[in-house]
Image: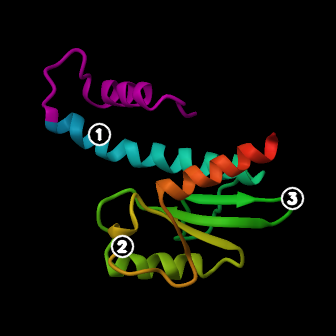
Amino acid sequence: YSIASPLLDLHFYLEAKYAYTELETPKEFIRKAVDEKVPRHVEGFIESLLAKAYGLRPVKVELPDLELDIALMGFSKLELVGEVKWKSRVKREEVKKIEEKLSKFRCRKVLVVPSEDALEREPGGIEVLTPEDLLEIAKRSLEALV
């Protein structure tokens, strides 16, 4: 199961893990939980946004030692795969790992970051998307409906 509201999800997570409503819970524990949970919600939101904008459906790619943040399927084939790195710095080594991971797929590849400045280097063969790009994609998909 998954809880759609990020705030409710965080509440239930903190309650289950730390009983934070019954005990004095240090802010560090709450910060750690937020840092752990928020990126997952960002990944889910972006995957859902791209799926709706492009008329694709989210799927889970189950391969040994391979987990994708975004995998979107058309009628019968994978159309888009991607990674979300929602942090202030994405190191060169991490960009290389993303390139290696996504190179296994023959479809559109995206890397979503909060800003292009977060990347220590541009990934090869992968489209970089920022919040501004996502907004533009969403606007275009809405205009297509009108």
Q: Earlier in the sequence, mark 3 or mark 2?
A: 3
Q: For residue 58: magenta? A: no
Pick out the residue farthest to the top.
22
Task: Give the labeled residue for mark 3.
Answer: 75
Q: What residue type is disc 3 on?
A: Phe
* Location of residue 93 by image quarter: bottom left
Closer to the eye: label 1 or 2: 2
* Location of residue 89 by image quarter: bottom left
Task: Give the CA separation, mark 1 to mark 2.
Answer: 25 Å
Image spot of residue 131 (x, y percent): 48, 54
Q: For residue 24: magenta? A: yes
* Location of residue 127 by image quarter: bottom right
Helix, strand or loop under label 2: loop
Q: What residue type is disc 1 on?
A: Ala
Task: Give the labeled residue for mark 2.
Answer: 119
Seen at 50% across and 51% down, the residue is: 43
Image spot of residue 16 (x, y percent): 35, 27
Task: Give the labeled residue for mark 1.
Answer: 33
Closer to the eye: label 3 or 2: 2
On screen, 11 above or below 96?
above
Query: What's the magenta region?
Result: 1-27
The quarter of the image holding the C terminus is top right
Helix, strand or loop under label 3: loop
Q: What residue type is disc 2 on?
A: Leu
Are the residues flagged by discs 3 and 2 in contact, CB closer than 8 Å?
A: no
